[in-house]
Image: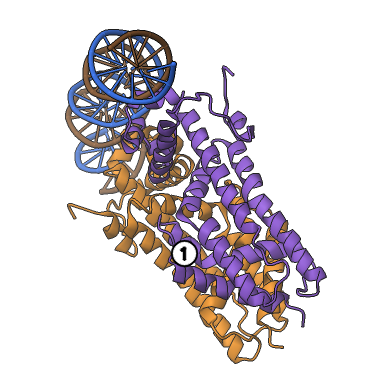
Chain colours: A purple, B orange, C blue, D brown
DNA sequence: ACTATTTTGGACAGCATTGTCCAAATCGTC
DNA sequence: GACGATTTGGACAATGCTGTCCAAAATAGT
């Protein structure tokens, strides 16, 4: 493990702590601070000093835990990705499989999906980070997309298929419908959270209602 | 005009050339190169030397035309914004007002809108630029959004209203429908053009068809 | 052909950043 | 309390970037 490239980091499902000591808290603080500073200033604009200060830690400690600025960036992306995917799949499990009131339950699900996962400011930060350096590290961008939005679409597509087989929806292309569902629900929230703030619950509720209603107008059996 | 802030530049509708000489070509080359380099490396990552080299120009010439790196950035954003808005409104004028075949003409319009304007790689570059530095210069971000997507949504909303009054659509909230139209059409193209490449005509055609068909399934009078 | 403007290349100071080294201080654990 | 691991702060060289200055070369206009 003399060398650890970006793709190595991304491929490792869960890198077990190389230092079993209790100084994992410092490591977490560093990764957290680095996430914030990278998101605020970009990769080039972020300085190790700023990250160390934000983490309340000496600069040397950063270099102690992390070899490079590049390696730190990769670790930050990896960390944020697994954390967010965990929340994403947890929310995904609350999809209404046996809905009593399809519209209401879909709206509630969309609210959870957009508010907690897709349109949180943490999610926007990660997405912007990975998009910006996507041209520099294409593997990073592809790995993130496959693990996150890719599986999201696949999961929602499968759920929509089951609703269609139950006669509750009229979808011929579940993959397309899945992407449209996500697009309709998140549409109005992206401009808000791209500015670094979380959308308000009222905004999330409005976006979910409007998106789901239009989705159902298009895909409810007539 | 001793000082020229970011907002000054953004508010000026069209800054007339301060140097009427024929060296405007150099200026254009500099702005073009700066746009490419800023889009590639971000504001912090872009160096004046790289921009000068990309423009085939001495570094001193850049400083001759442009006071600051910040001023250069503002000029680049201004330049790209007016250029793209010109194309946007030209395409917007081709909206089918008296459609013979609504679906076909809406699909063709959506193809022009997405392919030529919203999802071109130039558009994605500008959007990423303005989003990234949006936290640093909020006025810049707001000004861009009002001039570009804001007027786009307003214009499409008005057109949809007229189609609704003609009995061709069933929309109760034209603003919402307008944003949904754009979202449905551009949805599948954003991942492609965020990587710096233009989507292929086939991709644009597929996205426009799928988006418009779902839009009409939701909003065609029954 | 002459003149004014513009461009060029290079040198330069000031500053920020990266990554390393090291001795002292601190912390956790036995 | 003692010992090993960890953290700290500071110094340090190397590098790159910004923005300025200047004299020479090229370019445009008349």
The secondary element bearing badge 1 is classed as helix
When asked about the image quadrant of residue B116, the answer is bottom right
Q: Residue C19: image x %, image y %? A: 41, 20
Quadrant of the drawing holding the C terminus of chain A: bottom right
Tell me what residue is drawn at x 47 percent, y 64 percent. Answer: B85
Who is closer to the viewer here, A108 or C26? C26
Categorize mark 1 by other alpha carbons within 10 Å: few (<14), some (14-19), many (20+): some
Q: Residue B10: image x %, image y %? A: 33, 60
Who is closer to the viewer here, A68 or A61? A61
Is B55 displayed left or right of B12 in the figure? right
| Residue B8 visible in the shown view | yes
Which residue matches tag 1?
B85
| Residue B46 visible in the shown view | no
Q: Residue furthest bottom?
A: B166
Who is closer to the viewer here, B63 or A29? A29
Q: Residue furthest right?
A: A165
Q: Is residue B168 above or below residue A34?
A: below
Q: Residue D19: image x %, image y %? A: 24, 37
Q: Is residue A156 above or below residue B34?
A: below
Chain of the residue that carries numbered disc 1 in the rendered image = B
Q: Is residue A21 above or below residue B185?
A: above
Who is closer to the viewer here, A107 or B190? A107
Label tally: 1
Quadrant of the drawing holding the N terminus of chain A: top right
Is A142 displayed left or right of C24 in the figure? right
When asked about the image quadrant of residue A201, the answer is bottom left
């Amino acid at each position: 493990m003399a060398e650890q490239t970006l793709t190595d980091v991304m491929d490792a499902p869960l890198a077990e702590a190389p230092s079993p000591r209790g100084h994992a808290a410092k490591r977490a603080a560093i990764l957290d601070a680095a996430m914030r500073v990278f998101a605020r200033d970009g990769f080039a604009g972020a300085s190790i000093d700023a990250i160390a200060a934000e983490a309340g830690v000496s600069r040397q400690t950063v270099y102690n835990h992390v070899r490079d600025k590049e390696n730190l960036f990769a670790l930050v992306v990896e960390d944020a990705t697994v954390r967010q995917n965990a929340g994403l799949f947890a929310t995904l499990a609350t999809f209404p499989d046996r809905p009593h009131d399809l519209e209401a339950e879909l709206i509630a699900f969309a609210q959870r999906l957009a508010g907690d996962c897709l349109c949180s400011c943490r999610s926007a930060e990660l997405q912007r980070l990975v998009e910006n350096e996507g041209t520099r590290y294409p593997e990073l961008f592809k790995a993130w997309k496959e693990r996150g939005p890719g599986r999201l679409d696949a999961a929602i597509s499968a759920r929509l298929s089951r609703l269609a087989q139950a006669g509750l929806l009229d979808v011929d292309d579940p993959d397309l419908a899945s992407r449209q569902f996500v697009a309709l629900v998140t549409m109005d929230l992206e401009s808000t959270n791209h500015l670094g703030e979380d959308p308000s619950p009222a905004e999330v509720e409005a976006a979910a209602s409007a998106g789901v209603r239009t989705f159902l107008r298009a895909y409810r059996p007539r």
